[in-house]
Image (cartoon, rainbow, N blue to C red):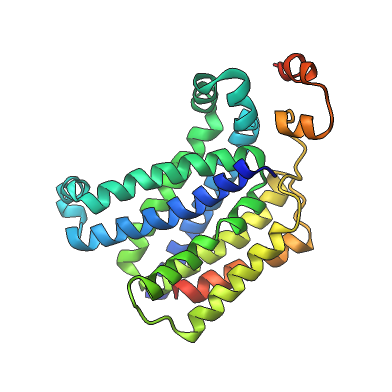
Amino acid sequence: MKSAYTWGGILVIVFASVVGDILLARAMKQVGDVHALLRRAGLWTVVRRILGNSNFFLGVTAMAVAFFSLLFALSWGDVSLVAPAAASLTFIGNAFAAKIFLHEKVDRRRWIAAVLVAAGVALLAG
Amino acid sequence: MTTRKYLVLAGVTVFGAAGDSMLSHGMKQAGNISLHHLQGVLLAVLNPWVAVGIVLLLAFFASYMNALSWADLTYVLPATSLGYVLLALVAKFALHEEVSPLRWLGIALISGGVGFVAGGPALTSHDHKPPPSREEREKDGAPTEEVVSGGVQR
């Protein structure tokens, strides 16, 4: 029963982080290349565009949810399971979600990268 | 990819790793925080390690947002996962902690993953493709006047 709670917590963390990453990535694609924008319009315009983007705020909110669910999950479950499992599954979840929602071309090269990094993170943090 | 963009990716990696480890070090000094003693959070922020950690994580967030403005999520995440490797190396050589063979394998896998993604293009999604930056235009051989007039599209 305890492990069901722990895995439920891990799923909530992974879901919230993936939602957050996707929303933040979409927000910044809408803002546009910050380097070009800085040169063209200055810092104030960049800040105003980012703060005026609703995806940015939703993304930050989702990240906050992920952070606090991590804190809660760590208080129920084993650190050596929760932290690496959440970090590693987030990499895989992001690869799927980026392909579906951001229309990124996740080719074989990127799949291999995501799986290798996820496995490596699981080993390092475990 | 310009030097400046590589610096941004390096910033995401280093600020993230350094911020996380400082925060973790400071929170161990500050002690446990429970739901019944939320004022402990305020005290924790006064710990210098925690304070510096928060500043570094803000720098991490700014560079992360910067990177996401010109690169795919599936590029930025693996490319900056070298931070985990950095933490393990700091643990080994600066803090003289034991790094087990399994962890070395983890380091090898992450480095391999970074190598895979680094060889490919940074941006593949065309939905919100931003206008090309000046360097990119100049590399394409566009005249400089083009940059000024063509740059203002919105």
Q: Is residue B147 above or below residue A87?
A: above
Q: Viewed as shown, does residue B29 lie left or right of B119?
A: left
A98 or B96: nearer the eye? B96
A73 or A104: nearer the eye? A104
Residue B40 makes an appearance in the image: yes
B124 or B97: nearer the eye? B97
Residue B133 makes an appearance in the image: no
Residue B50 percent location from the top left of the image:
26, 51
Q: Viewed as shown, does residue B56 lie left or right of A28?
A: left
Q: Residue furthest right?
A: B141
Q: Viewed as shown, does residue A46 lie left or right of A64?
A: right
Residue A84 percent location from the top left of the image:
47, 69
Residue B67 percent location from the top left of the image:
59, 42
Task: State the quadrant of the C terminus of chain A.
Answer: bottom left
Q: Is residue B140 above or below residue B45?
A: above
Q: Residue at x 62, y 62 (%)?
A: A92
Q: Residue at x 16, y 53 (%)?
A: B36
Q: Is residue B3 above or below residue A106?
A: above
